[in-house]
Image (cartoon, helix red, strand yellow):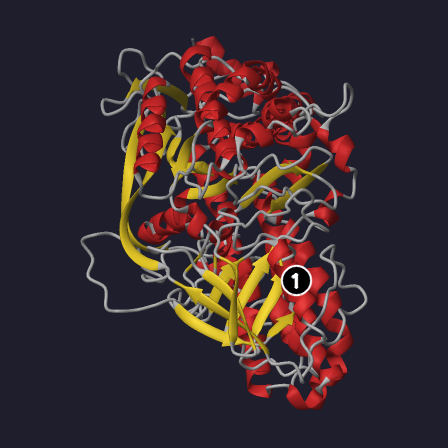
Amino acid sequence: MDHARATISNWFNSEPTSYTRFSIARQTDGDNSHVEMKLAADDEEGGEMGRAEHPPASMPPRWRSGKNFCFLIIAAVLLLLIGFLIGYLSYRGRMQKASRCLDGSSNCEMTPTASYLADDNETEEEEVAGPPVFYWPKLRDLLSDKLSATHLEDNLRQRENKYSVEAGEKEDEALASYIHDQFNSFLLDEVWNDEHYIKLQVKGSSNNEVSILENDKEELLESPETYVAYSKTGSVTGKPVYANYGLKADFQKLESVPLNGTIIIFKAGKITLAEKVANAREVGAVGALMYLDPYDYRGADGLVPFGHAHLGTGDPFTPGFPSFNHTQFPPVESSGLPRIAVQTVSSSTVGQLFRKMDGQECFQGWKSEVLGCKVMPSSAKNLTVKLTVNNAMVDRKILNIFGAIKGFEEPDRYVVIGAQRDSWGPGAAKAGVGTAMLLELARVIADIVKNEGYKPRRSIIFASWSAGEYGAVGATEWLEGYSATLHAKAFTYINLDTAVLGFNQMKISASPLLYTLLERTMKGVRNPAKDLGNLYDRVGSDWVKTIVPLGLDNAAFPFLAYSGIPVVSFGFCNRDEEYPFLGTTKDTVENLKKIHNLYQLMRAAAEVAGQIALRLTHDHELFLDFERYSDELLAFQKKFLPYDEDVKVLGLTLNWLYYARGDFQRATDALRRDIGSSDRENRIIRRALNDRIMKVEYDFLSPYLSPKDVPFRHIFFGKGSHTLQSLLENLKLLQTSPGSVDVNLLKEQLALATWTIKGAANALVGDIWNTDNEF
């Protein structure tokens, strides 16, 4: 021992009286080791150690001891570098694996982690056997292999021999019970009903009537079996005026025609019936008639469609509130109710009216296959139309049916897949296809989870809605009933309604957040119309330009515009041709089967929906492309630029709006950096980042408007003066009609748009101390 001390002393060219001793002792309050370093004399017997005496001749030269010291320093640095490289390579490997998971280019392990709710004081985690590793290609192939066109055909057969499945009636309740039982048979984790008590307007005790009054004589033209829900009841008379599709642009062509007190005739298509009626009411009409023109709806001769005239969604007698039976509401009505009489008629009835009208012929471009198209009767002719509406109000209980597969890591985060169940008439295309796909997806995904061992990170909810025919009433009432939590938990809605209305074209509506995922999904689904290729090959690289804006008649609309939840609605249709039987008594399975390759089309649409749902519950990072909204904002900015000088004349500026857009761009860049530099294996960090991603859509709901007064607050997809599109239209008036511009309204629009975008940017940044209201 003395010899060792002497050697150490020689190395450092000194004569130490003590040395360093390391003692390793186990902590009693934990299971980590503790290294204790003590400075002490190394006297094994506890005695004093005297100064070691060495003859001068044995001391090494100073250059040699310095050289040894340098070697020690170099060795220490090398050890540090080796340790750093090992740690870096390990981290880099994890990040590369995570990036491959995100871009789908390779396999990656997606084993769920423990709940983020684990007690922070626990120093040990329970060790459980991990689930099988599911790489995305394997999961995608499992879905494709298990989806069955035969099962879809069996599910659709439930719609055969149905005359009507009207909301809240026996047929609707029986189908709800069947779906509930099916969900249970699939062994879903949870199955439940959601009851709502709503007011519906239904057909009265007698049919509605359309008559002609000429020279004090009344001639009955038609008394159809169908009706338009929420129409004003009673009788109205007025001169007939034809307005093409009933678009605002069509009414602008009629500026020279007195429209007050008239009954407007328009054909179906382009926009919803409710929007057409609202446009007619705005010009002073007292009634409206809609028909299916054979130019757009081939084979629709003699057919009269059902519809509703509420410019909104949900129960119009509880606007902004859920229709629960234990809530006492004051008498209130939606501002979207038409307050004019509305009825649908056949094209033959419109033909009779045209033959009676001897005035101005239809404008060039107003194409119709009904012979003798006229705008109105001559002023000299005493011809009016009488419309009698006998609809009746009723109270109904409706049921929404739900089934859930719970996530293993974040069960309180979920994607919702939904379909309308009810229909006026047989509803094979309107509700049968979506319901068949819903049941098949529930069966297949449950099978993958229960029998193949897949453990989804997040939950999947399957929803069957009632009263969809009346304006997505069931879906909207659910959103209103749970609005306080749904926007923070539901991160995507997938709509299955009317998924097959043709075969030679695809119809896509979606939130920009889902464009990237939808494109990647289409690349992985075979094109059912051809032996080779996929759906992406069919739509082409510019498919985003063909996206159809969501309308009020799409059940996905309230999810997006009211609740701020990203949505996708996907299906097949025919190019430049509408499905003629939708909403009529001829919407049967027999007529639907006339669509070429029907069940393979249904299977392809179901595979798209299933892949989106599974991918959103599979990956660590939510597959929502939040950077897409930067592109959408930039596109609007380019449209605003030509009006910079016009705005300055009013003493205003668009610069604040542009700065807010820049702030949002910087916020998306910051979030992308945070994601790139984070440890994706850390469940707490991952959840925090995903929460920021899933709130992007919600943050584009203007917080400065009341949901009761303006339910659709989304500045991109909502309805009202607060939207960016409405702002653009007002700016255009500065050049086309400066005198008609409401400057105060313009100021309000600029303020709402600017601060909504700025608020979205602040929310995307994350913590409050990272936000900045300076422009």
481 or 386: nearer the eye? 386
Label 1 Cα crowd, 10 Å radius (few <14 / some 14-19 / many 20+): many
Residue drawn at point x = 58 percent, y = 52 percent: 550
Question: Residue most toward the right?
Answer: 364
Residue 721, can we see it? no
Instruction: Residue type at mark 1: give it.
Output: Tyr
Q: Is residue 337 left or right of residue 358?
A: left
338 or 691: nearer the eye? 338
Q: Is residue 230 left or right of residue 645?
A: left
The quadrant in which the C terminus is found is bottom right
| Circle 1: element type | loop
Q: Which residue is mark 1?
A: 245
Q: x%, y% of residue 344?
A: 53, 57
Residue 427, can we see it? yes
Q: Quadrant of residue 394?
A: bottom left
The quadrant in which the N terminus is found is top left
Q: x%, y% of residue 398?
A: 30, 44
